[in-house]
Amino acid sequence: MQDNLPPSQSGASSTSAQALPWHQVGPHRFRTEGDIIHWQFFGEVTLEHVQIGTSAADGIYESHGYCLTLMNAGGVTRMTAEARRFLGHRAKQRRYESPLAIFNAGLMGIVISRLVSSVTRLVRGTEPNFSIHKNEAEARAWLAKQRRHMRQPS
């Protein structure tokens, strides 16, 4: 499947007219698509990678008042302890919700996603808003529902 290729070889593209070019972060890449940060992971996720990603997500939040995350986790192999600690610390301090749709996740992608979800639940005392999907189309459909919810007045 094309989505499992390294970023330099993958022809994966979004249907979003607002998609910006891909930004390389180590072996991974991301781009912003309006109110979405779209990640493709390949290999190990380190502290530097999650710091760059959370900074980009903060920029989307500043522009839209929320941030949706679309993650192709098919190529992820592991997440370092430093990266997990950073995400746990950030979960305590985060001032906004960021619905996360994961697709193409192998066993490691699912394990990492559930681990991050458990940490969020423990430190914030709330259930994280994430969902795992078979493919990108299903993940985008779920995010579209989350977008409608995020845009509703409180």
Image (tube, rainbow, N blue to C red):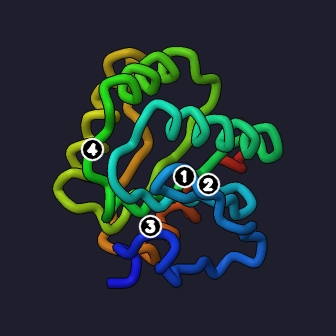
Asked if residue 47 is positioned above or below residue 32 in the image, the reply reads: above
First in residue order: circle 1 vs circle 2? 2
**Where does residue 31 sit, x and y in percent of width and height?**
65, 60
> Is the Cβ of the residue at disc 4 closer than 8 Å to that at disc 1?
no
Measure the C-alpha gap from mark 3 to mark 1: 10 Å
Q: Which image quarter holds the C terminus?
A: top right
**Where does residue 51 sit, x and y in percent of width and height?**
57, 32
Q: Mark 1 falls on what kind of element?
A: strand
First in residue order: circle 3 vs circle 4? 4
The residue tagged 3 is 139
Q: Residues within 10 Å of mark 1 (few under 14, many from 20)?
A: many
The residue tagged 1 is 69
- Which residue is located at x 52 percent, y 34 percent? 48
Asked if residue 150 is positioned above or below residue 12 in the image, the reply reads: above
State left or right for residue 134 relative to residue 16.
left
Count of residue discs: 4
The mark found on residue 37 in the picture is: 2
- Which residue is located at x 52 percent, y 21 percent? 90
Q: Mark 3 falls on what kind of element?
A: helix
First in residue order: circle 3 vs circle 1? 1
Check disc 3 and give the amino acid type.
Answer: Ala
The residue tagged 4 is 78
First in residue order: circle 4 vs circle 1? 1
Foreground: 97 or 81? 81
Check disc 1 and give the amino acid type.
Answer: Thr
> Is the Cβ of the residue at disc 1 closer than 8 Å to that at disc 2?
yes
